[in-house]
Amino acid sequence: MATPLETEPAAVQTAAGPGEDRPAYRGTLRYALTKLGGALLSIGMVIVATFFLFRLIPGDPVIAYTRDVPLSPDQIELLRRQMGLDKPLMQQFADFVLRTLQFDLGTSYEYKRPVTDLIGERVGPTLLLTGVGLFIAVSLGLWQGTRAAWHHGGRLDRFSTGVSLVLWSVPTFWLGLLLLMVLGAGIGPIPGLFPTRGMESVDAPDGFGYVLDVAHHMVLPCLTLVAVVYAQYLLVMRSSLLDEIGQDYVTTARAKGLRDDMVRRRHAIPNALLPTVTLVFIHIGFVVGGAVSVETVYSWPGLGLLFYEAIKGPDFAVMQGTFMVVCVAVIIMNTLADVAYHVLDPRVRSA
C-alpha cells in the first residue's frame, strides 16, 4: 500500500470531510460564484470612489487647460459646458456611471482624444516593462528564497535576507533616481552605460536592431522594478519554506533516507509555493497599471506616466480611466488568486 510520502506531500493531504461524497467541483463552483459576486461589488465601489475621489484634488481643469491662453469669462463658461462641468455633481456622477457601463471612459481634456484610445496606446509599453520585470523578480526571488531557507542561518541566508530587507524598504523612486545617476548619467570615473529616458532612440534601426534598442532602454527601469519586487518573493518564500521544514512529513522523509534535494523539490517546495500564489496574482494585476514612480523617473511611455501627467493637469477623464483600469485589474487578479488557492490547497476547501 502506498504511503503518503510516496504519493503527495503529507501537508497537502487531509482527512476526508463530511461532504467528501459530493462532487468537489460543486464546492469550487459555489466558492467561485461567491468570490465573483464580491468582485462585482468591489468594482461597483471602485466606480463610485473613482468619481468622487478625484473631485477632491485641488484645481479647476478648465483653468488648467487654458492657463496659457487668454480667454474671456464667456469662453471659459462655454468650455465648462462642453466638458459637462456645469451640471450638478450628482448628474455628472450619473452620466459617468452610465458611460462606464458602456465602456466609455470619456474624452481627455488635454489630448482631446478618447481615454480608451490613450490607454490602449500606453498599455503595450507597460506590459512589456512590468511583465519582464515581474517574471525576473518571481524567478529570482523564489530561487533565492528557497536556497536561503534550506540553508537557514548560513552566510547565504543572512546575506540574501539582509539585502532583500534593505531593497524592500527603499522607496522605488529613490532607487530609480540613484540608478539613473550612477548607471545612466554617470558619476566620476563611472561612465553612463544606459539611456536615461524613453523607450527607444530617435534613430532606432528596424528589425532586430530595434529590439536591441528597446532592450537597452529597458535595462534601468526593469532593474529598478526587479530590485524592489524580488525582495518580497524572497522573504515570502523563505518564510513559507521555513514553516514547511519543521513539519512532520519533512522529518519523516529525511528519516527514510531520501536525498535532501528530493525532499526539498518533491515535498517541501510544492507546499511552500502556495502562499506565493496570491502575491503573484496581485502583482499581475498591478502589471496592468505599471509602476507610476518607475515610469515617471525614466519617462517610460506607459500607463504610469500617463497617470502622472494627468494628475498635473488635472485631467479628470484620464485620471479616472487609468485608476479604474488598475483597480479592476487588481480585483480580478485577486479573485482569481482566491479561486486558485481554493483549488490548489485541499485544506482551504475543507475549512
Image: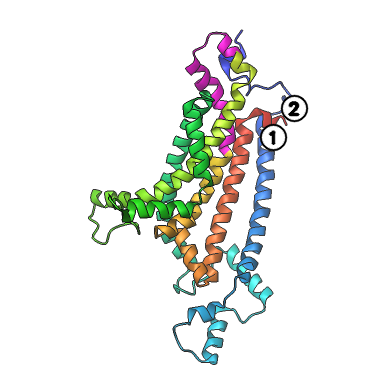
Which residue position is annotated with label 1? Answer: 27
Give the residues drawn in magenta, as a range: 252-277
User: Please, what is the dominant secondary structure of the magenta stretch?
Assistant: helix
**Residue 213 colored in magenta in the image:** no
Residue nearer the viewer, 36 or 42 = 42
Which residue position is annotated with label 2? Answer: 19
Q: How crowded is mark 1: few (under 14 residues within 10 Å), some or many (20 or more)?
A: some
Callout 2 touching callout 1 (CB < 8 Å): yes
User: Height in image: 91 above or below 35?
Assistant: below
Side of 135 where 340 appears, left or right? right
User: Height in image: 313 above or below 118?
Assistant: below
> Residue 282 at x, y = what percent?
56, 45
- Which residue is at 61% across, 35% downward? 341
> Residue 338 at x, y = what percent?
63, 40
As drawn, the residue found furthest toward the right would be 18
Give the numbered dot on residue 218: none
